[in-house]
Amino acid sequence: MNARESLPLKAICREDHETGGERQVFRLRVADHMRYKAACIQMGAFGTRLENVDRAVALIDETDADLVVLPELFAHCKDFKAGEHIPGPTTEVFKRLAREKGSFILMGSMLELDEQGRMFNTSVLIDKHGTICARYRKIHLFSYRSKEKRSLNAGTDVVVTPTELGVIGFSICYDIRFPELYRALVKKGAEIIVCPAAWPSPRLEHWIVLNRARAIENQCYFIGCNQVGTPVPSTTFVGGSMITDPWGETLVAAGDSEAIITAVIDVGVVNRIRKEYTSLNDVVPL
């Protein structure tokens, strides 16, 4: 049984194309008090792909949230050569699970292998009917003491998707340090932004500050879902998953161990704050 407390949508989503470019702009008018439960599954990817997927499924089974977010590389963290196609065996597991639970599932990120043999760090959103409704390839690849930039290809598309939960914008981990991406997401209509991560312990304070900053400056809900633990000897992930509201208040936050955290998302709050405190209207192109 889902915990959604929502009113019907006033209008279906409408897709426009700006003149002079190909950028898609989504608008979703929602009831003023559409409320639902979002959850972060803070877990560590300590095992094989199959073991990690099984653990993720078991944790998701413990929540009745309408939107469930997994961390970055929740299945593939220990093996940068373990890419697979989308759709593929891992997405099929979560498509079935989404249908069974009637929930949206954000497969934090996984290693995607495309038809040309290129590898990407890719988020996949599955709707409550078990349909893949969005895919985002990480744009900013981490280079500091990491093999990500050497091993993977960068995405190029800024991705938002309209859903009955609101307009969701996508980012992954290191992206959070680049505010230009988030302003682009908001220009395309994002009301809720997700950021699955595998964020290491030495920079916990950066993670906390950046989650709140991205929510404040874009007047949106920000869902940061991090890994936890030490899947490889050289790296410990700090946890600290958090859900932040459009005023920058932390609604809920996890510690440094495996956890499920939940918060109520009210898209009406996004609309009211943007109308009352109109900073997004005052942006000056430079």
Image: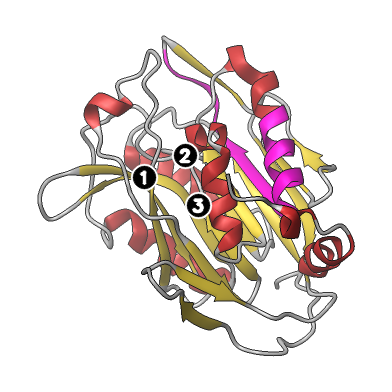
Q: Label 1's element?
A: strand
Q: Is residue 79 visible?
A: yes
Q: Which residues are magenta?
A: 209-232
Quarter of the image that includes the C terminus: top right
- Give the residue furthest to the left: 116
Q: Is residue 190 above or below residue 42?
A: below
CA–CA distance in space, label 3 to label 1? 15 Å
Query: Which quadrant of the view contains residue 242?
Result: top right
Q: Is residue 70 visible?
A: no
Give percent across and percent down for residue 216: 76, 44
CA–CA distance in space, label 3 to label 2? 15 Å
Query: Residue drawn 72% across and 89% down?
Result: 10
Give percent across and percent down for residue 95: 42, 67
Q: Is residue 98 above or below residue 42?
A: below
Query: Which quadrant of the view contains residue 66?
Result: bottom right
Q: Residues within 10 Å of mark 1 (few under 14, many from 20)?
A: many
**Residue 72 marker:** 2
Give percent across and percent down for residue 79: 28, 29
Q: Is residue 75 above or below residue 184?
A: above
Q: Is residue 2 magenta?
A: no
CA–CA distance in space, label 2 to label 1? 7 Å
Q: Nearer the viewer, mark 3 or mark 1?
A: 1
Q: Earlier in the sequence, mark 3 or mark 2?
A: 3
Give the camera-side residue of 28 and 49. 28
Q: Left or right: where does residue 250 sit relative to residue 29?
A: right
Residue on which the image places disc 1: 110
Residue on which the image places disc 3: 57
